[in-house]
Image (cartoon, grey):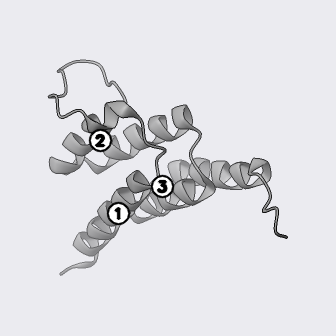
């Protein structure tokens, strides 16, 4: 396996692991086909992009979902890792800023 193929496989795995961390919504259970046209920012759209190896579009969809659902710092960290693996420096920086910002506003652990 060459370096590029390995990087894309790691990016795909990071995208998959970020998706699992999204807060669940009822619409996620829908198996309806994704309509052709404007991007809708749904989990189904993400899955379709991933199935067609459109990793940057899958990243964009997860980004929108994460913003709309108030994703966790761990989600943003995984999204940043995917951007790094795809050599998308600007997107990596944005996701890392959100990871840090989400940490600042995350509720503290009452046990500490």
Place of residue 88 in the rendered image (x, y in percent of width and height, measured from the top left): 45, 54
Q: Residue furthest right?
A: 112
Badge 1 element? helix
Depicted 47 relative to depicted 67: above or below: below
Q: How far apart are the alpha carbons under marks 3 and 2?
A: 13 Å
In the picture, the quarter occupied by the N terminus is: bottom left
Badge 2 element? helix
Instruction: Judge the density around disc 3: few (<14), some (14-19), many (≥20) Cα neighbours within 10 Å.
Output: many
- Residue, disc 1: 11
What's the residue at 73%, 55% (across, down)? 103
Mark 1 vs mark 2: which is more N-terminal?
1
Q: Residue furthest front?
A: 111
Place of residue 102 in the rendered image (x, y in percent of width and height, measured from the top left): 69, 49
Place of residue 68 in the rendered image (x, y in percent of width and height, measured from the top left): 53, 31
Depicted 110 relative to depicted 31: above or below: below
Badge 3 element? helix
Mark 3 vs mark 2: which is more N-terminal?
2
What's the residue at 53%, 36% (across, down)? 69
- Residue, disc 2: 46
What's the residue at 79%, 52% (across, down)? 104
- Residue, disc 3: 79
Instruction: Judge the density around disc 1: few (<14), some (14-19), many (≥20) Cα neighbours within 10 Å.
Output: many
Residue closest to the eye, 2 or 51: 51
Using the rendered view, name the quadrant where residue 42 is placed. top left
């Amino acid at each position: 396996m060459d370096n590029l193929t390995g990087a894309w496989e790691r990016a795909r795995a990071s995208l998959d692991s970020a998706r699992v961390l999204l807060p669940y919504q009822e619409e996620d259970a829908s198996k309806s086909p994704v309509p052709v046209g404007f991007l809708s920012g749904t989990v189904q759209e993400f899955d379709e992009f991933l199935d067609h190896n459109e990793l940057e579009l899958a990243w964009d969809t997860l980004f929108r979902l994460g913003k709309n659902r108030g994703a966790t710092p761990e989600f943003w960290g995984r999204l940043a890792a995917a951007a790094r693996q795809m050599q998308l420096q600007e997107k990596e920086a944005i996701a890392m800023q959100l990871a840090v910002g989400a940490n600042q506003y995350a509720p503290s652990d009452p046990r500490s």
